[in-house]
Amino acid sequence: MTILLPGNRARYKFPSPSFGVFLSLQALDVLTTMIGLRAGAAEANEFVSRTMQWGPVTGLAISKVFALILLAAALRFRRQRVVIVLNYWLAAVVTWNLLMISLLLVRVLHH
């Protein structure tokens, strides 16, 4: 993070790579979730699971709208660290999705 010193106040400049990472991880989450659902996995997130009653694409779209609202709120209130923490969380979610896909594939290949 870059610290800017305009006058006597210290400010943090939003780390631009974090925004791109956030959007990339959101896309990877959608992709891995769709692959996992197609392979037979169930959605673990209760909120997303409930929104999927209208279909998986609609449910994921609703959850991503909320993610973008959270991103906008973090940017608006200059809570840059929230985006960084969300990126770590999303990376863990995508890793979990990939693990579940791998386990489903192993199970299919062994039967």
Image: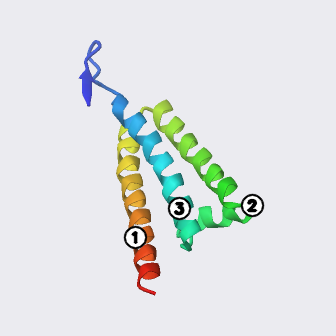
Question: Given the image, on which type of amino acid does mark 1 rest?
Answer: Ser
Q: Under tag 3, what secondary structure?
A: helix
Report how far apart the C-alphas of labels 2 and 1 lie in the structure: 27 Å
Looking at the image, the residue that sits furthest to the top is 7
Circle nearer the viewer, 2 or 1: 1
Please name the residue shown 44% across and 74% down the image.
105
Q: Under tag 1, what secondary structure?
A: helix
> Crowding near pointer 3: few (<14 within 10 Å), some, many (20+)?
some
Report how far apart the C-alphas of labels 3 and 2 lie in the structure: 18 Å
Query: Colour mode?
Result: rainbow
Residue 81's place in the image compared with 57, above or below, is above
Which of the two labelled residues, at mark 3 and mark 2, occupies the earlier sequence position?
A: 3
Q: Please name the residue that numbered disc 3 is placed on.
A: 35
Q: Under tag 2, what secondary structure?
A: helix
Residue 55, position as x, y percentages in the image: 71, 61
Please name the residue shown 69% across and 54% down the image.
58
Q: Please name the residue that numbered disc 1 is placed on.
A: 102
Question: Given the image, on which type of amino acid does mark 3 rest?
Answer: Ile
Please name the residue shown 62% across and 66% down the image.
49
Residue 14, position as x, y percentages in the image: 36, 29
Residue 92, position as x, y percentages in the image: 37, 59
Label number found at residue 54? 2
Which of the two labelled residues, at mark 2 and mark 1, occupies the earlier sequence position?
A: 2
Report how far apart the C-alphas of labels 3 and 1 lie in the structure: 11 Å
Q: Is residue 29 visible?
A: yes
The part of the image, by quadrant, that contains residue 45 is: bottom right
Q: Quick one: 10 or 79, which is closer to the camera? A: 79
Tell me how many marks there are. 3
Please name the residue shown 41% across and 35% down the image.
20
